[in-house]
Image: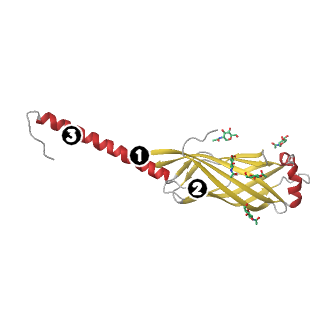
Amino acid sequence: MDYPSTKYGARRSGSHVCCCVCTALVLIVVAVFITLGLTVFKIRDPTMTINSVSVKIPPDSALIPANMEATTDSSVKNPNILALYYEKPNITSYYGDVEVGHTEAPAGVCPARDTIRLKPTMNLNVTKMMDDPRFAAEFANGAVDLNTTAIVNGKVKVLGVLSHHVDLLFNCTVTLDITTFSMKNHTCWTHMWFWKRKN
Ligand SMILES: *[C@@H]1O[C@H](CO)[C@@H](O)[C@H](O)[C@H]1NC(C)=O
Ligand SMILES: *[C@@H]1O[C@H](CO)[C@@H](O)[C@H](O)[C@H]1NC(C)=O
Ligand SMILES: *[C@@H]1O[C@H](CO)[C@@H](O)[C@H](O)[C@H]1NC(C)=O
Ligand SMILES: *[C@@H]1O[C@H](CO)[C@@H](O)[C@H](O)[C@H]1NC(C)=O
Ligand SMILES: *[C@@H]1O[C@H](CO)[C@@H](O)[C@H](O)[C@H]1NC(C)=O
């Protein structure tokens, strides 16, 4: 660029340099936020698959045990180009509306376009399940449905520095086969929030 030289030339070009630096900085910040916005809003839901559930029954238990230890082998797939850094997932199982088990999985990272395995173990309170009148009928049919939710607070990092909060909720309905104590069927949904989840 050509600037007319005046007697204030030196001072002018000084302020021009300053102005260019400021403009460049503003443009960089704008570019970073556009990238952040585009990347964050293009984030697709991670998906959860339950590979297997194994149930251990205390050896000294009665015909119907009071407690069962269930270990779930699940995979979480992150389809995004951003890694997902997550805090301890909060895992709760419900029978009907009643909470019958709770556990936490360790915190970690789900790398970009990758799948991680989670193998949380939780105690299921069979006494609480039996309090539900539907339990006897389901038990007699050999299959019990459990609703399990995993609440995950996490964040994604854009350009290695800027991070954005992401909350995930995985809801799975798992049908347990009572005769083999293994999983018969399952369905999972994912819900995602980019700002703090209410409640
Ligand atoms: C996880 O569950 C526990 C007990 O229900 C609760 O106190 C805690 O706030 C939960 N954490 C998250 C991140 O939801
Ligand atoms: C599990 O959740 C589904 C959908 O929210 C509901 O229809 C079903 O009754 C629940 N089943 C149990 C056993 O809690
Ligand atoms: C299971 O639930 C029953 C009834 O709510 C309660 O009395 C019992 O202490 C619970 N058992 C465990 C191991 O938490
Ligand atoms: C998933 O779980 C949440 C909270 O536990 C519940 O509000 C929501 O209705 C569930 N969604 C499905 C599809 O089961
Ligand atoms: C598994 O669950 C899905 C969805 O709830 C259902 O459509 C399907 O029939 C079930 N499969 C078996 C073998 O029960």
Q: Which residue is mark 2?
A: 46
Q: Is residue 176 left or right of residue 163?
A: right
Q: Residues within 10 Å of mark 2 (few under 14, many from 20)?
A: many
Residue type at mark 3 is Val
Residue type at mark 1 is Phe
Q: Which residue is mark 3?
A: 17
- Numbered tag placed on residue 33 in the rendering: 1
| Circles 1, 2 touching at the beta carbon (< 8 Å) | no
SS for tag 2? Answer: loop
Q: Is residue 118 left or right of residue 27?
A: right
Q: Position of residue 81 (x, y in %)?
A: 48, 57
Residue at the image point whose x is 54% and y is 42% from the top: 195
Residue at the image point whose x is 20% and y is 36% from the top: 15
- What is the spatial separation of the Cα atoms under label 1 and label 2, in whole angstroms? 23 Å
SS for tag 1? Answer: helix
SS for tag 3? Answer: helix
Q: Closer to the camera, 129 or 1?
A: 1
Q: Residues within 10 Å of mark 1 (few under 14, many from 20)?
A: some
Residue type at mark 2 is Pro
**Vertical comparison of 74 with 7: above or below:** below
Q: Is mark 1 within 8 Å of ligand 1?
A: no
- What is the spatial separation of the Cα atoms under label 3 and label 2, in whole angstroms? 46 Å
Q: Position of residue 166 (x, y in %)?
A: 55, 46
On the question of residue 159 being in view, the answer is: no
On the question of residue 83 being in view, the answer is: yes
**Vertical comparison of 15 with 157: above or below:** above
Nearest to N terminus: mark 1 or mark 2: 1
